[in-house]
Image (spheres, grey):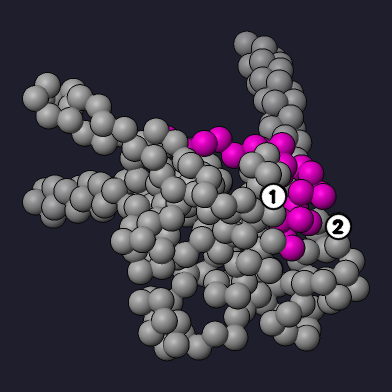
Amino acid sequence: MKRLIASLLAAFALAGAARAAEGGIEWDRFPEQKMTDMVALQNGAKLFVNYCLNCHSAAFNRYNRLQDIGLSEAQIKQNLLFATDKVGDTMKVSMDPKNAKEWFGGVPPDLTVIARSRAAVGKGSGADYLYTYLRTYYRDPTKATGWNNLAFPGVGMPHVLWQLQGQRVAVYEEVKDPHDAAKTMQRFAGFEQISPGTMSKAEYDSAVGDLVAYMQWMGEPAQRDRRHLGVFVLLFLAVFTVIAWRLNAAYWRDLR
């Protein structure tokens, strides 16, 4: 019993630490319709290879799996194959882990299943988290990288998509502390754009949606087939249940 209580307390402590790392803001809902949009998935793959695969690997996914989202082997070789010359290789990076740890303070994590691992009860899916995270970066001169993030306060990763989004600063307002009227607290009020990016806000949000859709797909490339198969399995079980019920009734009727 003592071990069980200790395990539960440890689990709650880890959950609390995870929530603290994820920040206190509400996660925006990822546009799920992009998961069935092949053009969006292909654009997301391009963004992933160009902006994420420089530091992060996706070592449990192979380049040739991109054929499942409508890309030909020739297109993969010509446009997305930068870290290797074999389309059957996994998506690894050439960065030395020792150098990465020295430069960034830690080895950038593998992103193959990042969208599946970041889900949180009561907040949303991993795709919701990533969609919010990549859209809430802002300039912070107190940080070593010059960037901070509302969804992940104190983030160590700089804003790799800043040229697309532009540079922003977070604006806060003073409000009354709901627990003590004599005190005030800072509340996030929005972003102020200080330099434009190459994309408008709507274009950037759509591009991030494409990127997150690809990362969600990458975590389980067969998920669409699994869902379709699941529908047929449920229909089969429903029909079989009716048949078994009628056979059971006929069997006992003959015995009586």
Residue type at mark 2?
A: Gly
Residue shown at 43% from the left, 55% from the top: 139
Is residue 112 rendered to the left or right of residue 249?
left
- Figure disc tally: 2
Distance between mark 2 and mark 1 Cα atoms: 26 Å
- Residue indicated by mark 2: 70
For residue 139, the mark is none
Residue shown at 53% from the left, 45% from the top: 193
Horizontal and vertical percent for residue 239? 74, 26
Q: Which residues are magenta?
A: 26-46
* Front-most of residues 54 and 188: 188
Is residue 178 rendered to the left or right of residue 51?
left
Is residue 254 rendered to the left or right of residue 138?
right
Horizontal and vertical percent for residue 18? 32, 51
- Residue indicated by mark 1: 199
Would you say the magenta stretch is mainly helix, strand or loop?
Answer: helix
Q: Earlier in the sequence, mark 2 or mark 1?
A: 2
Residue shown at 72% from the left, 84% from the top: 84
Does the magenta portion include 98?
A: no
